Image (cartoon, rainbow, N blue to C red):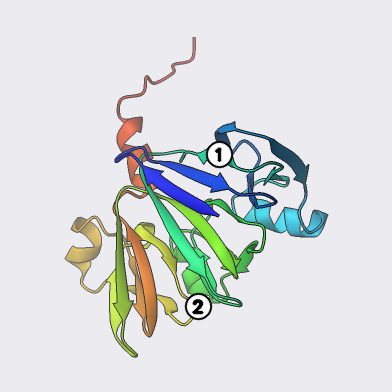
């Protein structure tokens, strides 16, 4: 399977499939396609796995696109301004991602929900208790709002992050939360009560545009409905 990411602010992922190759996405995830593409929609793994994906921000049903000829083109586009993040996963390699980050993947990649075990991280970590887990082998693609920055943390190295900026991380990274110190910092810094802590070793991917921040910004310009 070959692919090309085109564009800047609103990128498109062009996936070129060879004979028998396939890629799957959530319902409504495909933008356009060319060639003898066969579509098949299913719960992909059964109803229980489908319900788990729903809790992680994806659809109950997934659609698989398979090339039934020499070559096929299937194109996917993100739901918000941002970047497409390609991940080439080895057998058994896993990535934990924020809710609704999954874009598409080869059929060999497994998508399931990831339950955040720590109470504090689930309540105050910005994304709740349910995240997404991708397991290789194969190519997978995430859609990340804004720009993406990748960091590799050494063992014991800690990064403090506004929780809304965490896009994905490797399972070896320890995710927790800590309270912001100082009353003035809590009241006037705009960072709230808690920051996320990411402790290495492992890779983390951060996003520059949390959708919650974008929604709050746009809400200022939406008309306020008044009761008659």
Q: Is residue 129 visible?
A: no
Q: Can residue 207 be seen in this view?
A: yes
Reading the image, the residue beneath label 2 is: 171
First of labels 1, 2 by sequence position? 1
Question: How many C-alpha atoms fall within 10 Å of the one at disc 2: few (<14), some, or many (≥20)?
Answer: some
Q: Relative to residue 217, is residue 211 drawn left or right?
A: right
Residue appearing at x 34%, y 90% in the figure: 155
Viewer-side residue, 77 vs 123: 77
Viewer-side residue, 110 vs 4: 4
Q: Where is residue 202 in the image (x, y as percent from the top left)?
A: 39, 80
The mark found on residue 81 in the picture is: none
Question: How many C-alpha atoms fall within 10 Å of the one at disc 1: few (<14), some, or many (≥20)?
Answer: some
Viewer-side residue, 199 vs 25: 25
Q: Residue furthest front?
A: 70
Q: Where is residue 138 in the image (x, y as percent from the top left)?
A: 58, 65
Instruction: Locate residue 107: give its quadrant.
Output: bottom right
Q: Quadrant of the N terminus?
A: bottom right
Residue appearing at x 61%, y 69% in the figure: 115
Instruction: Locate residue 126: give its quadrant.
Output: bottom left
Does residue 18 lie above or below 120 as drawn? above
Reading the image, the residue beneath label 1 is: 73
Q: Relative to residue 29, is residue 214 drawn left or right?
A: left
């Amino acid at each position: 399977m070959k692919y090309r990411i085109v564009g800047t602010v609103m990128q498109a992922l062009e996936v070129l499939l060879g004979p028998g190759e396939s890629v799957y996405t959530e319902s409504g995830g495909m933008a356009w396609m060319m060639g003898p593409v066969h579509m098949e929609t299913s719960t992909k793994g059964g109803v229980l796995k489908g319900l788990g994906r729903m809790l992680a921000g994806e659809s109950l049903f997934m659609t698989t696109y398979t090339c039934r000829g020499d070559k096929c083109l299937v194109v996917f586009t993100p739901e918000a301004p941002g970047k497409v993040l390609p991940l080439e996963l080895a057998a058994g390699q896993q990535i934990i991602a924020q809710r609704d980050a999954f874009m598409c993947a080869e059929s060999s990649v497994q998508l399931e929900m990831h339950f955040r075990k720590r109470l504090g991280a689930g309540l105050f970590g910005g994304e709740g208790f349910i995240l997404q887990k991708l397991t290789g082998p194969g190519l997978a693609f995430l859609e990340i709002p804004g720009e993406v920055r990748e960091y590799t943390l050494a063992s014991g190295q800690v990064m403090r992050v506004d929780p809304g900026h965490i896009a994905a991380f490797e399972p070896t990274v320890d995710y927790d939360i800590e309270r912001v110190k100082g009353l003035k910092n809590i009241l006037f810094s705009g960072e709230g009560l808690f920051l996320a802590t990411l402790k290495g070793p492992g890779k983390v991917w951060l996003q520059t545009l949390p959708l919650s921040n974008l929604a709050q910004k746009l809400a200022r310009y939406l008309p306020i409905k008044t009761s008659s």
